[in-house]
Image: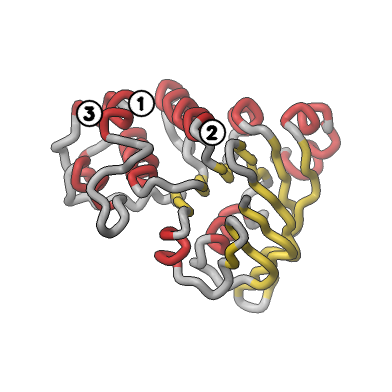
Amino acid sequence: MLELLDVQVAHGGSRVLRGVDLRVRPGEIVALLGRNGAGRSTLLKAVMGLVPATGQLSWQGQGLQGRAAHDIARLGMGYVPEGREIFPGLSVLQNLAMGLKPGRHASTMWPLEDVWRLFPALAARRDAPGGVLSGGEQQMLTLARTLQGDPAAVLVDEPTEGLAPAVVQQVAALLAEMRRRGLAVLLVEQKLTIALDLCDRCAVLGQGRVVFEGTAGDLRAATAVQQEWLAV
């Protein structure tokens, strides 16, 4: 289980996160919701060791504080950043190979055959440079590259941003497949309908804290929470 207790992050003297408590179990998707600037992406970066944080952060009973991002990845944590951050000069196949952990030549849970089945557009462009792919194809590649590291938990930041509806459906299908295979998924998603259709539980961030936590059904019924913390 990914467990966060009283997680706090400060930037330039102001506190972005003011004591976040959250748990994500294997085989479930937890959607992290909130307005822009609520600290959702910052929380993912804190878990990955990309920004300094206080409080308790642990994965499978091992503390994450003070560890470098590559050490956290080797503990079984995958990260899909909002900016995708593919290698534009490398081919699709080479980008996927960059996701493998040292000493690994093939992912045990996510072989390339599965990647091609889930994302046929990548199969058709396996030798193309990443930089010539469409935005949707680059998002597919980022997700697939993360899975090549065979993570047990994945932090996913805004995977459907700017994507066509058909690509959104493919991304959603992959997230559901990740859950089916027992991964713990912490999902930052701006589109409320997509997030609630996918998640087992959701947490809403507001003013640096979790202001609501419950099932998708709970949040659908909590119209006051939606209006106060999610409405634009």
Three-letter residue code for mark 1: Leu
The number of discs equals: 3
Q: Nearer the viewer, residue 114 or 12?
A: 114
SS class of the residue under badge 1? Answer: helix
Residue 43 visible in the picture: no
Residue at horizontal 36 percent and vertical 49 percent from the top:
149
Q: Position of residue 92 (x, y in %)?
A: 21, 41
Nearer to me, 190 or 47: 47
Q: Amino acid at mark 2?
A: Arg
Q: Report x, y in % for residue 200.
A: 67, 33
In three-dimensional space, the C-alpha distance between marks 3 and 2, rounded to whole angstroms, equals 23 Å
The front one of 167 and 99 is: 99
- In the image, what residue type sits under mark 3? Ala
**Residue at the disc numbered 3:** 123
Q: Which residue appears at 56% of the width and 43% of the height?
A: 184
Q: Which residue is mark 1?
A: 118
